Image (cartoon, helix red, strand yellow):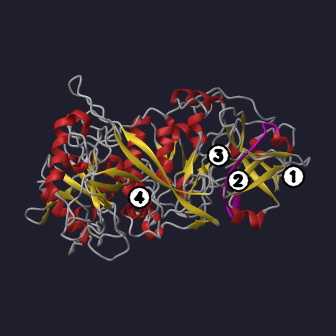
Amino acid sequence: MRRKPYCPFCRLVLTALGGPDVPSFEDGEPVSVAMSWDTEERKAVGPPGKDIPDIRYLRLGAEKGKGRFVDSDRVNLFTQLMLLANDAPTSSKILFARPIKEDQIDFAMVRNWISMCENWHGSSCNKSQMFRREVKSVVDEIPSFRLIDVVDNCIIRAPKNSKYAALSYVWGKVDFLRTLKVSWRIPGTILDAMEVTRELNIRYLWVDSLCIIQDDDTGAKADAISKMDIVYGACFITIMAATGIDANAGLPGVRPGSRGQRQPIEEIMPGLRLSARTRYQYLVKDSPYYTRAWTNQEMEYTPRSLIFIGGQVVFRCRKADQWREDVVFEDETVISKGRGEYSGDTSMTGDEIGTFEGLILSYSQLSLSFDSDIYNAFAGISNFIKTEFKINLCHGIPDAYFDWFLLWKSFVPQVRRQGAPSWSWSGWIGGSSSDIWDWCDNDPQEIRKEIKKRTWIIWYERVAHDSVEFMRVLPMTKLSSSTNFYGGRVKKRFPFDCSQTLPTPRTLVGAPKYYEDILNSTPLSGFLQFWTVAVTFNLGTPTSKANLIGPEVKFSRVGIVGRDGRELGTALVNPDWHNGHVPGKYEFILLCEGKGSIDDAYSEERYTKEWKYRVMLIEWHGEWAERVTVGWIEKHGWEQSFEPGPNLNPIRTTSYFQPQRLFMSVLRPCSDDGLPYRYSLYQV
């Protein structure tokens, strides 16, 4: 096709797939264009007998070898070639391609979209899928709430019940804006957002950098940041600057000549013009906006949005997935009930544990300019989680499922975030996830029932390093000698006295201080203190076969080997850690029972898993220890621990173990009388 620049069809296909970015070869194999016909259903919802013919489009792709898609991120896969509406042979032009105004956005069209949403969808689009709170007044919830008056060009204290737009954008690293106590100046993206707000006939605009005083030290800034769900959930519409690397980029198409991209249209023959269209979601790979942690909750909470991406503007609401400039859809009989690619109810359910796990996975994969914002940027989403699941969060881990959410794993090697605890996903940079959703049919009630039977640790969090006080992570349940952390019946598991559950009072010197846990109403130190069983095993090359399938696994798989030389289980570790530590003998703590093995990240057997013991590999740093990874061992594997190894004599008193140092906080036991200790209870 590159050899035929004179062919309008060849030009259009190459342009649609990515132009000069489309590789000729990949992995030594030639790249070819794949085409197939598909149809777009246009089912009417009006009077009976009003049949609208389906429309056909040409679906494009780039393949290498025998039908394998190219891996290059530069190629626009799943692009469609569509007939222009003016050249369509049918009377209905719905869902055909539409030429867009080259110079700038037609805001009369945008205002019409909003009117269509209000008239066709009614009140269902006035509240976002995640914002289920009843807020009578944003001002009452956020006393410092300010808005930009785009008519008088000033920042004001927000009037009650104001209709306002909100801006979601990437700050970037440029030194700009920010409302300080003395001065401020405005970058291009905010100026363009002000103009968009005027075009929508909305008087007020909210922008974080100007409507929150950035050097505030009264607590008003922290209060506003913790309520981003209210700010974006209560707005009328959010302007999303999905194109550009910083706040100076502007909004393409707002100012004349600023679109930055040309709509690909070619005349194949007289009266037959084709245009290429790509779902805007396929353009996000090139956008820093979709990699940022702050913008994630802003997207989740807005009831309506105008997305500036791919050289045009796209409208979304709860009933419309993408109304856009280059597609005709202004026909109520076809679109209004939420049908097809360009409409659809985007609501989510909050009664499944997978919803929560998905929110953590999505957020943890995103980037922050400042690690200290790890909880701030999650505050809005955490409000949804706490409300829907009726739980509290301890550094991002839900208290009602604490043991099992400590078993999170990552899909790529992570880097330690030093300002947060190592036992939480918040303490690591990189995506984290868990598999609890498929352990008990994604049913929170069934999960709560099972976790009572599969756990034994009573979790406490230290108040502060210089304090001997501690608080139970889940304070609502009533504890007794016969009940565990979740109120279940205590089960005899180990051949020694496990009745000691209260931590030993002590202070801690030289330990790191973590970011304040604003997700919790009573933020504590982030150091856990508890009793559990500690064991020592060898790490080496695994002898068992891995069940890993799917995406490339970038971890090193290690075998956990006991005293008799037999492999008891496995773990996945960061390759960098593996290179400096394996083989070797290391300490583990027993956490709880979990379904299946750690290999189940991509296992073909994930739905037929057995209950096994989950263990945490730890490393000591003076008086405390940190998580390295989580693995699994068979249930009786702990009996194969190395020295300090199995001492099956009953432990008569807990005074046999005087705490010596802390783990994340683990309090390490030691022997006062020279007796060997094995399978000792660790106060962690």
Q: Amino acid at mark 1?
A: Glu
In the image, 679: left or right of 190?
A: right
Nearer-N-terminus badge (3/4): 4
Foreground tag (3 vs 1): 3
Labels 2 & 1 near each other (Cβ < 8 A): no
Nearer-N-terminus badge (3/1): 3
Residue range of the region highlighted in magenta in the rendering: 619-636
Extreme residue toward the left, this view: 152
Give how far apart the Cα atoms at labels 3 and 4 are: 26 Å
Labels 3 & 2 near each other (Cβ < 8 A): yes
Query: Does residue 10 sit above or below 228 in this rendering?
Result: below
Foreground tag (3 vs 2): 3
Q: Which mark is residue 601?
A: 3
Nearer-N-terminus badge (3/2): 2
Q: Residue at 24% of width from left, 61% of height from top?
A: 207
Question: Disc 2 marks which residue?
Answer: 572
Question: Disc 4 marks which residue?
Answer: 284
